[in-house]
Amino acid sequence: MQSPDTPGPSKPRFKFKKSLGIASAALVTTLTIAEKAVDGVPAPGLKAAVGGLLELVKAIKKAHENASDLKELDDHLKDLTELLTAIPAQKQSEDPFVFNNRIAKLTSDIERTVEDCGKIRSQSKVNKFFSHQDNASAINGINRSIERAIRTFQLGGDIAMERDIKGIAQGVEEIRLHLKRSDVADPLQALKLNVADASFDSQSRATTISRCFEGTRTELLQTIYDWADDPGSKSIYWLCGLAGTGKSTIAQTVAEGFDERGVLGASFFFSRGVEKRDDPRFTFPTIAYQLGCFNDTFGTRIADSLRRHPNACDAILRTQLEKLIVGPLQDVDRGPPVVIIVLDALDECSDKQLVKEMLALLVSAIPKFPFSLQVFITSRPDFHILSEFRGPGMKSVSEVTLLHEVDISVVQNDIRIYFDHHLRVIGEIMLGNGGWPSEEELNAIVEQAKGLFIYASASVAYIGDLENPDPQERLKTLLSEKMMIEASPFSGIDKLYNHILYNSLPRFGAWNSARKLRNILGAILLLLNPLTVPSIEKLVSVGEGTVRPMLIPLHSVLSGTEDPKRPVQAFHKSFIDFMLNPRRCTDSRLYIDPNIHHTQLALQCLQHMNTGLRRNMCDSPNRFAMNAEILNIDESLRTQVGPHLIYACCFWAFHLKHADRTDQVLRNAVSLFSATALLYWLEILSLAMRLPLANQSLKIAQGWYTEEQSMRLTLVRKAIPVSEHLGILKEPLKSVEEKILQSTTPTKGLLHDCERFVLRFFKVISDSAQHIYHSALPFTPQCLFHEQYKDELKGAVKITQMEDGWDPILSVLHGHLGNVRSVAFSPDGSRIVSGSDDHS
């Protein structure tokens, strides 16, 4: 190393001094920061030690040599500063005794470094000391001391952390077995989001659940229980019967019986028009969830399969069954000997083809289980189900009972027991006469039921109506009505329903009152999800307190009419069938035309969305919040959005699909919605975890517009020749056609762009409603949708170079972990299957 006193070339000496000055200045700066970093540490000795080290470095700064050594010293001091800065945070997470010992050791090491270097400071000329070749290692000594102090302190922390980790590991091991069920529950809870609320004891069915009255159906119930108990019986029991013959009541009774015996693995009570409960795609996920809750071993296996196949719920029926049920359970070595599944009202599934596929899959899967899997099914004798059960594959494994072919005398006797008990109770309570009705009256009302249990239950509810406490008069009225001339198995129940409706009208009087009641009933019976009375009033825009008085006389056919917290729905589907059939509902004032009432409901939904939706309706204070971070999100949706508006957001397109395509007011409402409310609508679907409904709705709306456009073009093309013949044609055909096409172009374009928007940003929108505006809309390509909603970009990131239009990729499917080696499409193009190196 060259001494400062040694002459040399001026230019290199200048560079050397400059770099040395920078290095020494950095030393002082670094250590000054370190001294301040320990202000918050309750260890006065440490602050003093660092202060001593600072003074030492200031003395060293007077020397202008050994720049590389000073640079190394600066690096070590920076490490020390970083360590000292982190001390307050470590103190919060470490055992106090261990932490204080580590601080004391660090203080001692720094003090020793300062003390060892005191000899250097005691020399008369520090500069000369550092210029001497033999003593140049002194700075290296300081470097090594500081490095050693840092290592010792960090090692103590590592040891303390290791000790903590070992303690935590021991605690985790101790509670692992206790939490094993919770570990299983996580995937099952995720699965629960994809299941229907359709079990035999579901709260959603609370108002419609009924079981066989004691002493009735005894022979049939015993037959079913014998089938379940017989190891050699066939795997499937199909109970088939016409509407009103009591199938669901029997299914409820045997489900409860199987549950009491501990053999009911799962149950699914289908219901047409109730979301998820009329869709076969939710059947296998629902059964899998219930099976997982039924048995711990089942739950563990199903949870493991869900971890490997997280998208199984969204797959086709075959894959659902394989990944959620057959695969996990086909080799269980510990499980119950018998598991029974109950499927009620299979005819109420919306997709007939999927029903047939589901039955075929069940038949093929049953032999694969190591336990006895038995399935109890009820349905009407609809052709698509009847043909499946008559097939060779199903016929060999199923028992069949046709309720409508059971000896009528047996059924009538059961109905007599039911009437006798309930009417005598009504007589005691309302008349004080336990001997009412007479034997003649009892025989007559039993005969009038014609074997339909629904007639019996509806008649008892009607006769025992406390709002009209004259059961004798009501019974006489039913018995005095002449039977309908038309020979029909439903003549008795139709007469009863017509009578109930007729007697509900005097309260309202004129035709106008009948029209109001019809509109309310149309909404109740056609809703995809039932709503409470207050929500119905908001949806159909009638005054508060208007609906309940109309429905009180109908409590024998509708549930939830008196409780504002319970949804209103028909007790039995036969009432819905009756109201929608003009040949059965003979009062034209009350007949519900599905086309008219779906049009009304679609318009009401759109009007509520057009006027009620706005940005950030739940008033989240964090405009970047993830949905999972929003507290009490369900309560916020209920109070700040409202069940009626949530329903409108979810199901407007379902009603639009069945609505009048020539209704101009409805067309205008769709156009306004497309131009102003699409983003706010997506917000609600995201918060309500219903985003998959978005693209379904958008496809329906586009299809509705296309069909409406085609209808108008057809009408114009038919009218043109007549106009030409009469000489009143004002425009050529091509001009008129162009106007029709252009009139729907903006709306269809917005709907199409919105569909592409949801496909591209589905994950973002699903996770956060707020990020529609911050992470999705800014990256939307140049298109009509982006131009229409660009005002919503205020405060969002600005993208200067945007894509010009949508690219050909509609969506990216995730699921495989390895490379995809094969892909195949179904013949109709609706499904795709792929194979991967990961064996999935």
Image (spheres, rainbow, N blue to C red):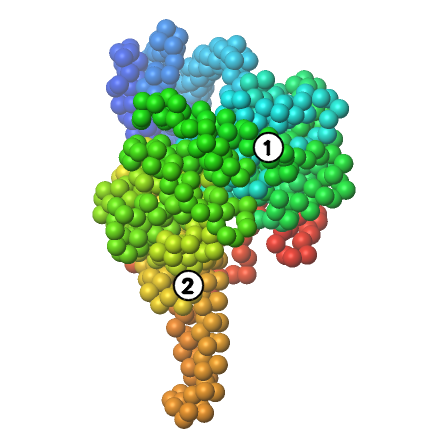
Task: Name the spot of residue 188 as percent of width and height, x first.
Answer: 53, 28
Local crowd size for mark 2, using a 10 Å CA cut-off: few (<14), some (14–19), many (≥20): many
Is residue 195 or residue 439 the one in the foreground? 439
**Residue 760 in view (yes/no):** no
Write down the quadrant of residue 208 in the picture: top left
C-alpha separation, residue under disc 1 versus residue under disc 2: 48 Å
The amino acid on which the numbered mark 2 sits, given as a three-letter code, is Asp
Residue at 37 percent of width and 34 percent of height: 463
The residue carrying mark 2 is 660
Task: Name the spot of residue 772 as percent of width and height, x first.
Answer: 38, 49
In this rendering, the label closer to the viewer, 1 or 2: 1
Is residue 115 or residue 837 the one in the foreground? 837
Task: Name the spot of residue 521 as percent of width and height, x first.
Answer: 36, 48
Figure quadrant of the C terminus: top right
The amino acid on which the numbered mark 1 sits, given as a three-letter code, is Ser
Local crowd size for mark 1, using a 10 Å CA cut-off: few (<14), some (14–19), many (≥20): few
Task: Name the spot of residue 148 as percent of width and height, x first.
Answer: 45, 16
Query: Quick one: label 1 or label 2, which is nearer the N terminus?
Result: 1
Write down the quadrant of residue 430 in the picture: top left
Q: In the figure, is residue 369 to the left or right of 785?
A: right
The residue carrying mark 1 is 409
